[in-house]
Amino acid sequence: MAEPDAVRTFEDGLAQIRATFEQALRAAEDEPQLRLINARYVGPQGELTALLKLMPKLPGNRRRELGQAANALKQGIQQAFDETLDRIHRSARDAELTGPHLDLTLPGRWQMPGRLHPITRIRNDVLDIFVSMGFDVADGPEVELYENCFDKLGFPPDHPATDEHDTFFVDGDRPSDAPTVLLRTQTSTIQIREMMKRKPPLAIVSPGAVYRRDDDATHSPMFFQLEGFLVDQDVSFAELKGVLTLFLRRLFDEHVALRFRASYFPFVEPGGEVDMSCVFCRAWEQDRARTAACRVCKGTGWMEILGCGMIHPVVFENVGYDPEKYTGFAFGMGLDRIAMLKYGIPNIKLLYENDVRFLSQF
Amino acid sequence: MLASFRWLQELCPVDADVAEVARRISLAGLEVEAMERKGHDLSGVVIAEIRAKKPHPKRDDLTLVRVFDGENEHDVVCGASNVPDPGGRVLFARSGAVLPGGMQIAPRKVGGVESSGMICSEEELGIGADGEGIFVLDEDHRALPGTNAADALDLRDVILDISLTPNRPDCLGHVGIAREIGVLFGMPYSPRKAAGPRRAFLPEGAFRPGQPTTRLAPLWDSESDMVDSPKLPAISVEIVDGDRCPRYGAALVSGVEVGPSPFWLRYRLHNLGLRALSNVVDATNLILLEWGHPIHGFDLDRLRGSKVVVRLADEGEKTATLDGIERTFTSDDLLICDGEGPVAVAGVMGGLFSEIRDDTKHVLIECAYFDPRSIRRTSRRLGLHTDSSHRFERGVDPEAIPQVLASAASLIAELGGGAVAADAIDCVARAHRPASIRLRPERAARLLGTPVSKEESMRILESLGCRIVEHDGETIEAQTPSWRPDLTREVDLIEEVARVRGYDQIPTAMPRAHVSEAGTPGLLKLVDELRDAAVACGLYEAINYGFLSVEDLRRARVGADAVMLANPLSEERAVMRTSLLPGLTGAASRAQRHGATEVRLFEIARTFQPTGDVLPHEQTVLAINLAGHRPGWIGAEQAFDLYDGKGVIEAIIDRVFGRKPELVSGDLPSFMHPKRSGVVTLASEGVGFVGEIHPEVSDDLELIGRVIYAELDVPALHALSEKLGPPQARDLPKFPAVTRDIAMLVRDAFTAGEIADALQAASNGLAESVRLFDLYRGDQIPEGHRSLAFRVTYRDTSGTLTDKQVDKVHGSLAKVARDRFEATIR
Ligand SMILES: [Zn+2]
């Protein structure tokens, strides 16, 4: 049943809203306020919402017309709302873009500052180079048989060549005075183990912990070595020089020069040691005064970096390879020493004290 | 090995300075580690003549001396008691001179008397060990006052410190090093004959009949006056064990007078690190340094029965060595005995009884070749490493024995007077056989990677002292010199060729491209991945020693059945670790003591478990240790707890395997907290544990607060990774998900995990996940209860879920919570 009052109420209501909404909405200063004002018109308890609830009471001939007017008003409100909201957002953004800076000095979140041990870092660097040259990585036990550490590597029995290797022996394996189990003194044991397991061609590098009974300012009773070897037909000393030159240039500096000196290790022949031009005084730049004052190379311009040589035929015989058919080279280096050189670590003991203040530097 | 450059130049006069010689021999394998100039820093020290001396007015121990330094007279106060009378000459440091020790000479008052300059001792000038009195020149010395001391005494030298590898015994004497220099500088070295003694005698009757002898006279370069043989009991040498002592020679010098050595000899020994004792002993030391051949002088009058017997000791036999210590021998030790008992430990050290004394008159000089292995075993057993054993265990030159005897006898006679027996005993039990080696230059060329000609090879081998027996187109057969026991096979000769040419003459090449067949073993790759994952979780990598103390194992309650070392450096490092716990928590404890507030460490290393086999089982373990505060942003600090450890383990495993591990109750090591630790499982298999360290253990390890420790079994993870294979892709969801929360009050007896599992099971497959997002205990919650809130994500893989569907299934979840867990839904 239509009520003539309803039409009036409706029209007055619309007029009232129409007269005020624009100004009310546009006066809002922030989004919550805007939404509050908006709700006064179109929220569940809003004025326009209340009018729309009167719609069924409007006479049929006016309902359509008034409905359209109400809808137009609702759209007007929506538009004013949208525009105001947009303005508020814009001014907030402008304020942020032109206003005060965030405190950049507050600490960052998501901090997970873990570190690899410097020996691991160097080991990874060294392995990357050799692996990219086609070397495999291998591993062996730290508690070893005497024969793998000495006999099979061509150390003659009762020979002073073992003096360099002051060895820890394992107790109680045999009552005799000839111990058979020891802590490996060199990673060359892996040469023996891998050659006994596999057939040439072989190219292998093997990093690992080794043990010697030395404990002073420059020696640690446990330290890390990396051994490498390559066996094939017709492998030559020239190739040994090539591989080591490339390796050291990639690890240290493309300018380093190498000097191969004759030396002696029972498992290689010809055997040698490699000196590298000092990377501290950059000896290759021939700044004589700088090299003369260099504490690392003691003014010589050279630093001893690794031992190497052609694998001794006796080693091949001991692992069942034909030394007439196969030749190969081997080299070994101390990872501790390289880490100390590269990171300027003054004392080997720091590497094994696990002081967090030290470990967090790398 | 210390070597005098002056001496080397006398033996092999190459035209090169010391730096060049040092460089060349270093490259060839005789590494010169240091060079020390001698007598170069005495510029203010001159010969001065004593003009007058009188007692110091106040002090008895001082003398006032007036010296003339060639220019002026100076008054000097001297503290020595051996100031010579006027006319005597001394070494005088003028004011302004700086002595080798850094002492600056300046005028000063001594006992109230002005003293200008200093009269020096050997020690003060660094030219000898004598610091007792001042140095006084021999009367027959011709140097005039004012002459520089270095010139007057011929002090200038350079001492090379050569690090010799054990394969080069030939270079343990100056002759050998000079020979090497000759080879490298293309200047063939020929050993010079020794100067002959002034007086010699034919040893008729001196040696027991039948003793094999060798003539020394041909080895001397000058004639000797022949004198009558002294009347001595006949001497004999008997080698009982010819394998241990293949050759034994003995020369006789009769009528010596033991006394101090002349300055030149003392100076040379001093520079080479030996202390001068007496002329006879100093002579044996000089011969040792010249020839690299240890010799030993016996006092013939104390050699009972005038007899030398070389034999093995009886088990338990005893004698006192020169150092005054009584030694007990085994039946593996070679002794030098006289007619009654041991007089020396062969090749190692002389005995106390027959050593040269001040009253020694007749010296029997021993020069022998002993089996190197035998000497080494004895030397090591006795813990006696001597200049003698050092050389014998590396192998001396057996063929040099007559020459060494000739030089030694002549030198002793020169210094101590006396006459030399013109023949020496020379017992050869096993004749030296030179090795005969075939060298194929073509093989050398292939091994070195550079052409090697037959002519060059032969030239090098001959310069080294090899005798070319024959050669044809392809091979050279060479006999090696007796002083190079290290040359035994072809490759040794190839090394000689390469070494003499210089390794720098070998070109640089790259090997044929080599393709790895095996690649890096999976376990090693896994170790690297775990290490990177641990670092990504904010952990620092530790590396501990593989050994520790029995006490460390006991304190940490880890396996005490460990691999023990027979010769540890200390009790602190006497056994191989059976766990990484002691090492890692030791680092944590030290960090806490420095005041570190957060300790986040890991280590990947091996533990060693004894087995029935010869070698122990080596197990790679990843261990993690958290102590102190969790790294947070600004605000309240929170201590690490089990869930930090669990989170790290989850993050590491998730990163490496793409899966989540579970934490369940189960068997834990006794060092872990029984209620605050759990077993880590992956695909239902145990791979480690994580939790708090047992409070009692934590106290024993001196840790502060609750400390989190975890271990992962790396081989077990590796085995699983092979079994599980790589992650497989799944379809992405096509339909949207709906989330609903459910909060409940429930007793502590029920775990969040079992409730979540039950809720998921009750969802008819519609709950994609059930995640705990809130846990609350406190004021509103009754004792023994907690409030848990789960967020359930519903999704139907075949269509979009309606609210009604979700309401229904969510209701059934609440029912399960009430019925199974007696929960009050909130
Ligand atoms: Zn340098």
Image (spheres, helix red, strand yellow):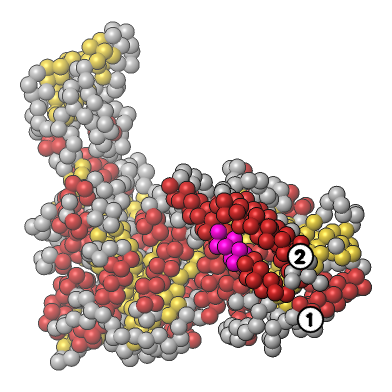
Quadrant of image for the C terminus of chain B: bottom right
* Badge 2 residue CB within 8 Å of ligand 1: no
Q: Main secondary structure of the magenta part?
A: helix
Asked whether residue B303 appears in the rendered view, the answer is: no
Residue holding disc 2:
A4
Q: Is residue A344 magenta?
A: no
Q: Going by the image, does B31 lie left or right of A360?
A: left
Q: Nearer the viewer, residue B233 or B61?
A: B61
Q: Going by the image, does B591 lie left or right of B779?
A: left
The range drawn in magenta is A71-80
At label 2, counting other C-alpha atoms closer than 10 Å, the crowd grade (few under 14, some 14-19, many 20 or more) is few
Secondary structure beneath disc 2? helix
Q: Nearer the viewer, residue B394 or A231?
A: A231
Give the quarter of the image for residue B774.
bottom right
Residue drawn at 81 percent across, 79 percent down = B809
Residue drawn at 27 percent across, 70 percent down = A245
Q: Where is residue B252 shown, x and y percent of the image?
A: 28, 56
Which kind of residue does numbered mark 2 sit on?
A: Pro
Q: What chain letter is assigned to the residue under label 1?
A: B
Of the residues tagged 2 and 1, which is closer to the observer?
A: 2
Residue B805 is marked as: 1
Asked whether residue B188 appears in the rendered view, the answer is: yes
Secondary structure beneath disc 1? helix
Q: Nearer the viewer, residue A94 or B3?
A: A94
Q: Where is residue B326 shown, x and y percent of the image?
A: 53, 51
Q: Where is residue A289 shown, x and y percent of the image?
A: 18, 46
Residue drawn at 14 percent across, 84 percent down = B454
* Badge 1 residue CB within 8 Å of ligand 1: no
